[in-house]
Amino acid sequence: MKQYILEMEEYANEHNVPIIEKDSIAYIMKYIKKNNVKSILEIGSAIGYSSILMASANPETVVTTIEKDEARYMECLKNVKKCNMENKVHVVFQDALDLNLDPNNKYDLIFIDAAKGQYMKFFEKYKYFLSDNGVIITDNLKFHGYVGKSEKIESKNLKGLVTKIENYIEFLKDNEEFDTKFFDLGDGLSFSTKKNASK
């Protein structure tokens, strides 16, 4: 499988597909092992890089991953098959904001790594599917170093996107239902757990 992971990294580099940074996914995989995470919901599959690695972190881990871009969805399916992960990674082709999951579904880990401007909507929609002691992890909170420097950005679109990420960080800090820890790993990670969760 190692060879396929390297091939995915090369593909992402050549085709400008954003994939999670190595130290971030390594940290998440450690968390999955340590906490015996069995069910994961990933919002934003891209080419399947993070879902395959998360699923490989623990023998019992199963990942459901959602992707709305058809080309990336097809590439993700191809990579899942190559890595013999069809039983552990289930790929859903749909916009995560339109998807209606079974309300009884509960996940030990929800990983948000899709459209940055929609982070707050993803969090609010999917928090109900988190198991009591589960965690919501969000990637790209530094957004290539732009976050915290939005006043210096000249591009209107980029500035708007960075402002949305900054607002999301404030939303996490002020959230009355969740405790959030921020990690200066890769492109910036946050781990949010329910405040009433039994430790």
Image: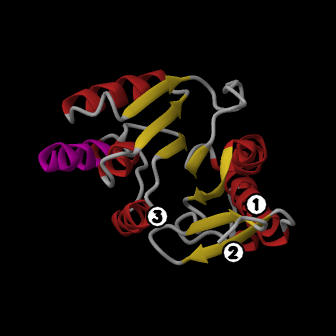
Mark 2 to mark 1 CA distance (whole Å): 15 Å
The amino acid sitting under disc 1 is Tyr
Q: Which of marks 3 and 2 is in front?
A: 3
Q: Which residue is drawn at 43% across and 49% down?
A: 18
Observer-nearest of 24 and 195:
195
Magenta-colored stretch includes residue 176: no
Camera-side residue: 182 or 141?
182
Judging from the image, the colouring scheme is secondary structure
In the rendered view, does 199 fall on the left or right side of 91? right
Q: Which residue lies furthest to the bottom in this view?
A: 184
Within 10 Å of disc 3 (Cα), the crowding (few <14, some 14-19, many 20+) is few
Give the structural element (helix, strand or loop) at label 2.
Answer: loop
**Residue 105: x, y in percent?**
63, 34
Q: How crowded is mark 1: few (under 14 residues within 10 Å), some or many (20 or more)?
A: many
Tell me the number on the disc at residue 168.
1
Amino acid carrying mark 3 in the image: Asn
* Magenta region, residue range: 1-13
Which residue appears at 35% of the width and 35% of the height? Answer: 88
Q: What element carries label 3?
A: loop
Q: Which residue corresponds to mark 2?
A: 149
Up the image or down, 100 lies above or below 143; here it is: above
Q: How far apart are marks 1 and 3 (CA)?
A: 26 Å
Mark in front: 1 vs 3: 3
3 relative position to 193: left or right: left
Q: Residue at x 64, y 72 (%)?
A: 199
- Determine whether, in the image, residue 37 is placed left or right of residue 53: right
User: Quick one: label 2 or label 1, which is nearer the N terminus?
Assistant: 2
Q: Quadrant of residue 99?
A: top right
| Quadrant position of residue 183 | bottom right
Amino acid marked by disc 2: Lys
